[in-house]
Image: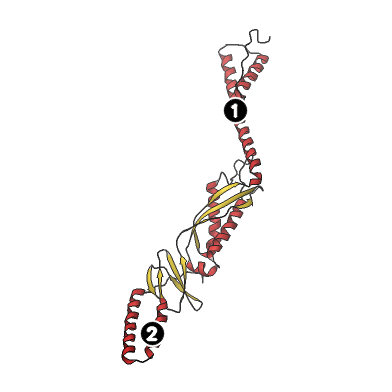
């Protein structure tokens, strides 16, 4: 059996009033008769008083009688139940868990630092109380295991190759969904409901951070240069076409090569070009 069973407890106020009436009657009987029998009954009443308990909002009490699960009280208020029941308090509130940063290898073997932010709460009090030992520790350990598995399933980032591959850095929505599903599956045995799970911190490990930053910068520079060259080629092509179409100048192969070279230097150079005025012919 791993199903939660809700039970109703007797109102504590009704039981408290009844016990007070019995207690007053016993005290009066002891005073009037002087028999010690009433003292024994007083001890019995004190034992019965152990049955009183309080359930706060978003909290619960799991009831066990001599090792047998009897049910869970989730109603809020002041109650009384069989004094022989043992009561285990389990909070039903949503809780935040911010895991420690762990160093793991991503899919392609790069060491990275990663942690997770988890929002969870107890859904099944029976499983949380009896199917696992210390369900709060179980949440921490299983979350750490899920993060390690997730990090090994995706690369941290992609570069020139594999542009369509989902990565930890660029595919946050898909990665967080996969993380939430993985943690939900792991915590199901403990009766835990996962409200939200997402990566809270992600970075390369310090020993490779500088090298990977240089690689990222190099890739960005190459990509930018490629765009510049593509744009420059289009501009040169348009310029040659318009000059020829408007009959501004006739180009032979040497003149075209020289003009293309000059325009590419001007358009693709890192620094501003310094003009040189030619007072002779183009070939002088």
Percent coordinates x, y for residue 53 in the rendering: 41, 72
Question: Can the viewer see residue 160?
Answer: no
Q: Is residue 109 above or below residue 159?
A: below
Percent coordinates x, y for residue 268 in the rendering: 61, 25
Q: Nearer the viewer, residue 167 or 94?
A: 94
Residue 23 disc label: none
Residue 50 sits in quarter: bottom left
Residue 224 sits in quarter: top right
Name the residue tied to disc 1: 228
At a point 61% along the width and 30% down the height, the residue shown is 225
Say which element carries label 2: helix
Q: In which quarter of the image is the C terminus?
A: top right
At a point 54% along the width and 47% down the height, the residue shown is 172
Residue 219 in the figure: left or right of residue 139: right
Q: Is residue 49 above or below residue 167?
A: below
At a point 38% along the width and 90% down the height, the residue shown is 37
Question: Can the viewer see residue 20?
Answer: yes
Circle 1 crowding by C-alpha within 10 Å: few under 14, some 14–19, many from 20: some
Q: Which of 40 and 107 is in front in this view?
A: 40
**2 or 1: tag closer to the N-terminus:** 2
Residue 42 disc label: 2
Percent coordinates x, y for residue 75 in the rendering: 39, 68
Say which element carries label 1: helix
**Image marks 2 and 1: residues in contact by CB distance under 8 Å:** no
Between label 2 and label 1, give the one nearer the viewer. 2
Percent coordinates x, y for residue 95 in the rendering: 48, 58
């Amino acid at each position: 059996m791993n199903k939660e069973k809700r039970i109703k407890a007797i109102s504590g106020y009704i039981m408290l009033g009844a016990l007070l009436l019995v207690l007053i009657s016993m005290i009066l009987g002891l005073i009037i008769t002087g028999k010690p029998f009433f003292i024994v009954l007083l001890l019995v009443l004190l034992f019965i008083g152990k049955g009183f308990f309080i359930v706060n909002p978003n909290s619960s009490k799991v009831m066990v009688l001599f090792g047998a699960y009897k049910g869970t009280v989730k109603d809020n208020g002041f109650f009384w139940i069989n004094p022989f029941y043992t009561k285990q308090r389990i909070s039903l509130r949503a809780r935040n868990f911010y895991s420690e940063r762990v160093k793991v290898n991503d899919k392609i073997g790069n060491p990275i630092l990663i942690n997770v932010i988890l929002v969870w709460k107890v859904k099944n009090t029976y499983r949380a109380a009896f199917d696992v030992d210390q369900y709060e520790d179980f949440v921490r350990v299983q979350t750490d295991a899920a993060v390690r598995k997730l990090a090994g399933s995706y690369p941290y980032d992609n570069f020139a190759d594999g542009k369509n591959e989902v990565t930890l850095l660029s595919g946050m929505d898909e990665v967080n969904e996969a993380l939430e599903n993985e943690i939900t599956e792991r915590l199901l045995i403990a009766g835990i409901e996962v409200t939200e799970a997402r990566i809270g911190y992600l970075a390369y490990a310090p020993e490779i951070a500088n090298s990977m930053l240089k690689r990222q910068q190099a890739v960005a520079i190459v990509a930018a240069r490629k765009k510049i060259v593509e744009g420059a080629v289009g501009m040169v092509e348009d310029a040659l076409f318009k000059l020829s179409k408007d009959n501004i100048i006739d180009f032979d192969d040497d003149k075209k090569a020289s003009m293309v070279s000059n325009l590419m230097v001007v358009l693709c150079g890192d620094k501003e070009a310094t003009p040189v005025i030619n007072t002779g012919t183009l070939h002088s």
